[in-house]
Image (tube, rainbow, N blue to C red):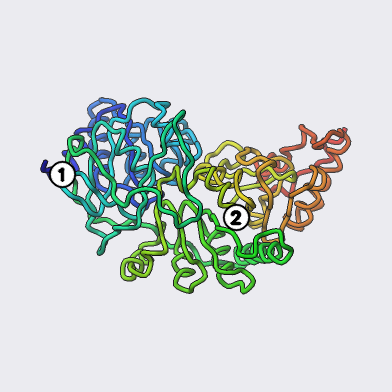
Amino acid sequence: MSIPFITAEEAASHIKNGDNVGFSGFTASGTPKVVTVALAKRAKELHEKGEPFKINLFTGASTNDHVDGELARAEAIGIRTPYQSHSDARKLANRGAIHYFDTHLSHVSQDLRYGFYGDLDVAIIEVTEMSPNGEFILGAGLGMAPTIARMAKKVIIEYSSYYRTSFRGFHDNYIPLDPPHRREIPIYKPSDRIGSTILKIDPAKIIGIVPSNDSESIKPFAASDEVTERIGANVCHFLGEQLRTGRMPKEFLPIQSGVGNVANAVLYGLGNDPDIPQFEMYTEVIQDAVMTLMEEGKCKFASTCALTFSDDAMLHFMDNIDFFRDKILMRPGEISNHPEIVRRLGLIAMNTALEADIFGNVNSTHVLGSKMMNGIGGSADFCRNAYLSIFSCPSVQKNGAISAIVPMVSHVDHSEHSVKVLVTEQGVADLRGKDPRQRAETIIENCAHPAYRELLWDYVKLAEKNGGHTPHNLSASFALHQAFMETGDMLKADFARYDK
């Protein structure tokens, strides 16, 4: 059958108030960029007439301004999951104007299939190649495209002509069987392909094809500074030591890395460290640094869910795409982040924290315990099941007014049971085999900023008076946070006031 080309406005007209809408892509990569702009305009027009209009937004991860930005500004989002990073959406979530629930990226596709969120009314999927019989080639991000293509009652295709060459061969579209029929996921090394390069969609469900020529609009990360470079050096020194002492296989292990300046600095550090051998990656996103490491021969292969390249780096990638064809494989998020595979491959999982407490619990999502930043993303998918789970962050923020090491985290995303190693620019805290008191000593002495060490020891001494396996003084455990809220400076916390 012939699939018609339609305008973005025509496509948007098929989406109704209250619809569950799924999107392709993962981060900005592979995310639709045209229909949602028309949908936001339609929402504003309906609101001006006094008519309600909101959709429930299901994505692989974060999106871009075309999706979360446009729809948030139009107040057209009802439910949002699993991860967002746009400031406009974040503001609405923190006001309670969006029903945002934060969940693990590896769970969303299967939770949709299990029916936890109801039917999927519409899927909007960006493709870079297509045929009349319903065979499509996706773009720079896969996300949960295979699941939403199968489940959606109606499908809208955004055909991107931005890419100058074919992505054919880079994707591994695969959906596991659902319980009680699920079998093992047969990936035994990062390069194993288990699915199809082609995404098949029933043409009868496709409303139409909307042309698009927009880039991913991903800006490059800021250059490394002294702090991020020291964090990267500390991680590399630690991993080199693990190799020398035989705590890690001599051929090394696949790497998972989060997103951001610290993650980029760590990756570049690995590339420059002569003690770190060539390595492979099994991760959810790859950034500009990975492309460089591949061209330098340090990174041999990367399994990922998306190419989160800056626009300039993406142009370079497209100009040299044949070099990368046998070095990169894109998978659905539920496979790139699958706990079974993470455990089997023995990953080195490297993610970032907002804050960590002296016992090893990590907060990745909430500022001062209540204000959502982005979401847990895939960090827990990896850290709980990794061979080695590493969390890193600068020891202080806001010119020293905030300590990233606190007596008790204001929100727990990763418990002490999953966190093996903490790293700041101050040093490395290896928490393996340590009881709570030993962890506190290791973290304070190795990771806390010198300006905060005495203050943290004051808390430990106060808490020790209560005894217990994990010594705490519940009245004083958030004293640093309270001091910041009252004075703008955690250093002004005074534990003497709690010593009664």
Of 253 and 149, which appears nearest the observer? 253
Residue occupying image coordinates x 74% and y 46%: 358
Q: Which residue is mark 1?
A: 7
Of 403 and 333, which appears nearest the observer? 333
Task: Left or right? Give the position of 349 relative to 238.
Answer: left
Residue 339 showing in the rendered view: yes
Asked which secondary structure carries label 2, the reply is: strand
> Disc 1 marks which amino acid?
Thr
- For label 1, the crowd category at 10 Å Cα-Cα, with few meaning under 14, some 14 to 19 and many 20 or more, is some
Q: Is residue 195 above or below residue 265?
A: above
Q: Is residue 231 above or below residue 71?
A: below
Q: Quadrant of the C terminus?
A: top right
> Disc 2 marks which amino acid?
Ile
Asked which secondary structure carries label 1, the reply is: loop
Q: Position of residue 456 (x, y in %)?
A: 79, 47
Residue 54 showing in the rendered view: no
